[in-house]
């Protein structure tokens, strides 16, 4: 078992057994001995039968269990557009690619296959928790929540709010009251299908300041105050044109972060995607309010938004996680986001004022992908690490083992499985680094959420 202990440190639990009960909760973590498979269930009072106790072993040397990934920011309806962004940047990308597609998914017959596919795809990449933006349409937002619940993916599902004339007339809320009412309708649906939010939870989703009128932001801020159990997600300071637009649209506010703060939307349960161009004062305000940041490196490079200064945010005390921001980002894989986070941080380090300290390590990006992400979405007591009391949201990662002839002795045949070649002389630290930079969904052999097997690679 490999998991993040701290931001900078992975813990390698060799020769270890983890027991998960019928509710999907980790109830014991202890050394694995020959007697463990019988002694541990007996001590836990479990019936001594293979019918009630399943034992899953990682192959020594080539497989390991890792916490499921937390994708702290992605847009389910944008999946058909992955890889399509041309020469655009944020504001023209929204109008050219994004709004027409999202609007078209108010047809449930069109939304269903897209959402079913997104869930299968993200699970196959090891994403056990996803913070989703749906669309303005309540029916298809609720469908996304239904499908997450049925597939067993842990999810935050947000009905997108946007009533300003930044958005085209064919795809926006009629007004602030309508947007708040539609949000309430979607929250009520999610509360009904998963009371207590064991798996699926609603999230207030003002798309971003430019797409919301002050009246809508005010309405959502009031709703946030009434429902302190519901998180909030939005975008912030992704693109310089967007920042300028916010200054123009909200001249009475001091800053972009100040806009959300003025309406009661900058809170300890707020997930802010991007945060590329925050000022010193804004980062301090975000830290003071305890709002969290979803770092989306793949998206920030793809649609030329910029390079977020993650080290700078972390040093200010801002909790960060990773987001694919699909389809701003072209990949549904959090492992890809982790890899891109390393690369972007190395570009940041080349800026004289930032320096070497800006570089993020493999350990750090894996922390952001799991334990950090869990904090970002408010699930730090439930997921993100292997600890007694947390739930079994995990992936079994398998690496291809090269045999004496240069073929693969484990992990399938060349080209079909593998993705990462291991020669047997690597340390575990090196195997994990190879996985981060060369791994993909072929290496994600099985995935569980709350103890339930939700994906298996045949
Ligand atoms: N800002 C407002 N909407 C969006 C969106 O859909 N994607 C990204 N990346 N940024 C946004
Ligand atoms: Fe986004």
Image: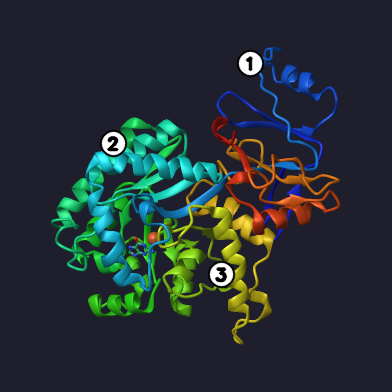
Left or right: 85 in relation to 110: right
Percent position of residue 352, x then y: 61, 87
Mark 1 burial class by Cα count in 10 Å: few <14, some 14-19, many 20+: few
Q: Looking at the image, is mark 3 or mark 1 earlier in the sequence? A: 1
Disc number placed over residue 115 in the picture, else none = none
Q: Quadrant of the C terminus?
A: top right
Left or right: 1 in relation to 454: right
Q: Quadrant of the N terminus?
A: top right
Disc number placed over residue 310 in the picture, else none = 3
- Numbered marks: total: 3
Instruction: Identify which residue is drawn at 21% across, 51% down.
Output: 180
Mark 2 burial class by Cα count in 10 Å: few <14, some 14-19, many 20+: many
Percent position of residue 250, x then y: 25, 75
Query: Of circles 2 and 1, which is in front?
Result: 1
Left or right: 19 in relation to 370: right
Q: Residue furthest bottom?
A: 352
Quadrant of the image occupied by residue 29: top right
Q: Are marks 2 and 1 in contact (CB under 8 Å)?
A: no
Q: Nearer the viewer, residue 408 or 42?
A: 408
Disc number placed over residue 189 in the picture, else none = 2
Residue 7 seen: no
Q: Which residue is mark 1?
A: 52
Left or right: 330 in relation to 163: right
Percent position of residue 374, x then y: 54, 49
């Amino acid at each position: 078992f490999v998991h993040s202990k701290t931001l900078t440190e992975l813990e390698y639990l060799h020769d270890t057994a983890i027991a998960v009960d019928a509710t999907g909760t980790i109830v014991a973590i202890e050394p694995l001995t020959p007697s463990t498979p019988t002694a541990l269930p007996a001590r836990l009072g479990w019936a001594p039968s293979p019918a009630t106790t399943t034992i899953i072993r990682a192959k020594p040397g080539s497989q390991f269990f890792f916490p499921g990934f937390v994708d702290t920011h992605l847009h389910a309806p944008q999946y058909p557009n992955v890889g399509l962004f041309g020469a655009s940047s944020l504001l023209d990308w929204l109008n050219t690619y994004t709004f027409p597609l999202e609007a078209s998914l108010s047809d449930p017959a069109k939304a269903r296959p897209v959402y079913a596919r997104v869930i299968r795809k993200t699970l196959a990449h090891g994403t056990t928790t996803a913070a989703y933006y749906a669309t303005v349409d309540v029916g298809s937002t609720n469908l996304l929540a239904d499908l997450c619940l049925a597939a067993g993916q842990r999810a935050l599902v947000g009905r997108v709010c946007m009533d300003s004339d930044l958005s085209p007339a064919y795809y926006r809320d009629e007004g602030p009251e309508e947007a708040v009412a539609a949000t309430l309708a979607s929250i009520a649906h999610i509360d009904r299908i998963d009371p207590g939010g064991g798996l699926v939870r609603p999230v207030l989703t003002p798309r971003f300041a430019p797409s919301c009128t002050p009246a809508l932001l005010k309405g959502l801020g009031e709703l946030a105050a009434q429902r302190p159990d519901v998180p909030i997600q939005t975008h912030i300071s992704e693109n310089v044109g967007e920042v300028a637009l916010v200054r123009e649209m909200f001249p009475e506010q001091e800053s972009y972060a100040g806009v959300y703060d003025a309406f009661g939307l900058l809170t300890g349960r707020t997930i802010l995607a991007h945060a590329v161009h925050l000022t010193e004062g804004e980062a301090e305000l975000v830290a003071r309010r305890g709002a969290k940041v979803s770092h989306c490196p793949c998206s920030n490079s793809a649609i030329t938004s910029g390079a977020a200064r993650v080290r700078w945010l972390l040093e200010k005390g801002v909790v960060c996680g990773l987001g694919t921001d699909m389809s701003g980002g072209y990949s549904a894989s959090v492992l890809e986001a982790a890899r891109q986070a390393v690369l972007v941080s190395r570009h940041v380090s080349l800026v004289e004022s930032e320096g070497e300290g800006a570089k993020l390590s493999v350990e750090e990006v894996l922390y952001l992908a799991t334990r950090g992400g869990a904090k970002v979405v408010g699930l730090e007591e439930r997921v993100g690490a292997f600890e007694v009391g947390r739930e079994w949201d995990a992936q079994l990662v398998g690496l291809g083992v090269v045999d004496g002839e240069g073929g693969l002795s484990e992990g399938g045949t060349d080209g079909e499985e593998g993705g990462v070649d291991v020669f047997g002389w690597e340390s575990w630290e090196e195997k994990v680094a190879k996985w981060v930079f060369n791994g993909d969904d072929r290496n994600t052999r099985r995935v569980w959420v709350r103890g339930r097997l939700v994906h298996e690679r045949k």
